[in-house]
Amino acid sequence: MAWIQRLDPIALAYTMGSDAMVNEPFCVWTTTGAYDITISSLTPTASTSFIATGQAIPANTVNFGVQFDTDTDASDGAVVTEGAVIINQSPAASGSPPSCLADNAAVYVNFSEAGNLDAAPADTYVDELTMVIEPR
């Protein structure tokens, strides 16, 4: 059995002259203490370039990258390929009953400005990441 706890929605604000990025720590609990994780998008790419689509005009898109780490700072974590399994991650909180006393993983999302945000039409861009945790 596996749980993800304390994972919050990721909202980004773009300020001209810089990339838009955020780190979101959370807790993974498994009965085994180790797990595989798959991070996928509403727009499948099977690449390291994820896509957010415009809400006013869905043909408007911006690219972003995702990183994952088994500590609370994923800015230095593994680059995620959309929809690919990242195998044998640990540690996870374990034991019974399920309890996450501290965050033990993080996801980092980065929208580059150059040739991406600075070239995108005005719109609200959205994507939804789905994380699937499988105990090992």
Image: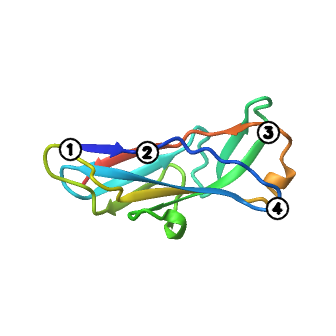
Q: Which residue is mark 2?
A: 7
First reached walking from the N terminus: tag 3 or tag 4: 4
In x, y percent, where is residue 105?
39, 58
Q: Secondary structure at mark 4?
A: loop
First reached walking from the N terminus: tag 4 or tag 2: 2
What crowding class fits label 1: few (fewer than 14 Cα within 10 Å), some (14-19), or many (20 or more)? some
Name the front one of labels 3 and 4.
4
Indicate which disc residue 60 carries. 3
Q: Which residue is mark 4?
A: 17
The residue sitting at the top extreme is 56
Q: Which residue is mark 1?
A: 98
What distance separates the C-alpha of mark 4 from that of mark 2? 29 Å
- Quarter the N terminus occupies: top left
Occupied quadrant, residue 70: bottom left
Name the front one of labels 3 and 1.
1
Color encoding of the figure: rainbow
